[in-house]
Amino acid sequence: MRAAGITFAAALAPRSLMALERSDAVYASGFRAPDGSFGIATVSERGEIVDRITLPARAHGMAFSPVSGRIVAFARRPGTFALALPMAGSGQPFMITAPEGHHFYGHGAFSPDGRRLYASENDFDGNLGVIGIYDATDRFHRIGEFDAHGIGTHDMAVTDDGTTIVIANGGIETHPDFGRTKLNLDRMEPSLVLLDARNGALIQKHALPPSLRQLSTRHVAVGDNNRIWFACQWEGARNELPPLAGWLSKGEDIALLDLPEETTIRLGNYVGAIAVNRREGLVGLTSPVGGAAITLDAKTGALLKEEMVRDAAGVAPAAQGIAVSSYGGRFNQTRSGVAWDQHIARIT
């Protein structure tokens, strides 16, 4: 129970306690309930719901700090709220609000020491992606921002040593006046950026070549030796088959993944989530469009496993392999009466 870090353990039903007893890992994910409401659930490794809380709107990605035991759920773009919850010990939840003229892009990450929270944001009047900086030791007050050196700043991560912020700039212009409409598909500017976490200085920026300017770089995951894996969504012609994932390391150029053609077709030009299992040297990708989950060798990028999962949503490292959820309610071996959202955070 202490390892699971569940604040509300004393109030859990016996069935939930049994689910935790059998678990080597605990996860958190956003969901939509049958009545249309939204929330976050903690989930056992088997996929059994341990507990849940209600949110005011749909959540997207989450950040977890093992140091503070807090998890932050970010609203789906173009939402303006994030909710910080205490998952261990006592404490109060905090509602974090994006500054005026900004909205969250649905993702963020803690510094390794748990003292800072970084969030991907859109300065929509300036058409500029930024990384908002929040003091996690002082009620998540916003203390500054870094230029993300791109537009459509979506997912982000922090390296294990805390020195580098990794950013996936999707290259797509949006504005809340137009909801989720993509305003510049004919002139996209996708890129991958590395920033110095101490001062926001640009370390590297990798723009995709002109032939791939409609390949939106959306999600990132950090593996062993700070190898950065990234996943993409193609916004060009449906009959084209661009590479949908790749990797890079500091000081090196990007390497695009060469998957078998039938696998690329199955992914439907859309990878919605990516995760790395460092212990087993695996990378997991899911595509809700193609209804597929694939597993790669983290050293070579070779395809190891391919599974059809209708409405595949989130991925996360499991005790063995990769945990996969779906919009249809599947989470590993269990199917629940909720629609899981696109991302999973492992919280142990």
Image (tube, rainbow, N blue to C red):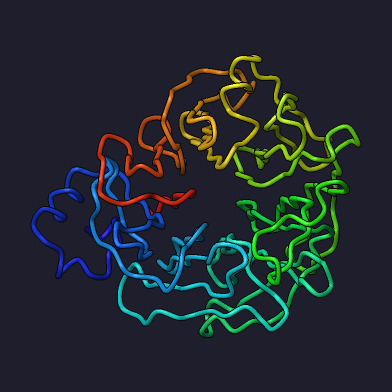
Q: Quadrant of the N terminus?
A: bottom left
Percent of width and height locating residue 84: 45, 73
Comparing 2 with 107, the one in front is: 107
Comparing 113 with 237, the one in front is: 237
Question: Is 323 situated above or below 179?
Answer: above
Count of marks overlaid on the render: 0
Percent of width and height locating residue 324: 41, 37
Percent of width and height locating residue 105: 63, 62
Q: Is residue 248 left or right of residue 80?
A: right
Question: Is 282 situated above or below 168?
Answer: above
The answer to which image quadrant residue 179 occupies is bottom right
The answer to which image quadrant residue 249 occupies is top right
Comparing 252 with 232, the one in front is: 232
- Of all residues, the one furthest to the left in this rendering is 14
Comparing 226 with 270, the one in front is: 270
Residue at the image point whose x is 54% and y is 35% from the top = 289
Q: In this view, does 130 lie to the left or right of 119?
A: right
Question: Is 272 situated above or below 88?
Answer: above
Residue at the image point whose x is 39% and y is 49% from the top = 340
Residue at the image point whose x is 81% and y is 66% from the top = 128
Question: Is 291 situated above or below 185?
Answer: above
Q: Is residue 108 visible?
A: no
Q: In this view, does 133 lie to the left or right of 31?
A: right
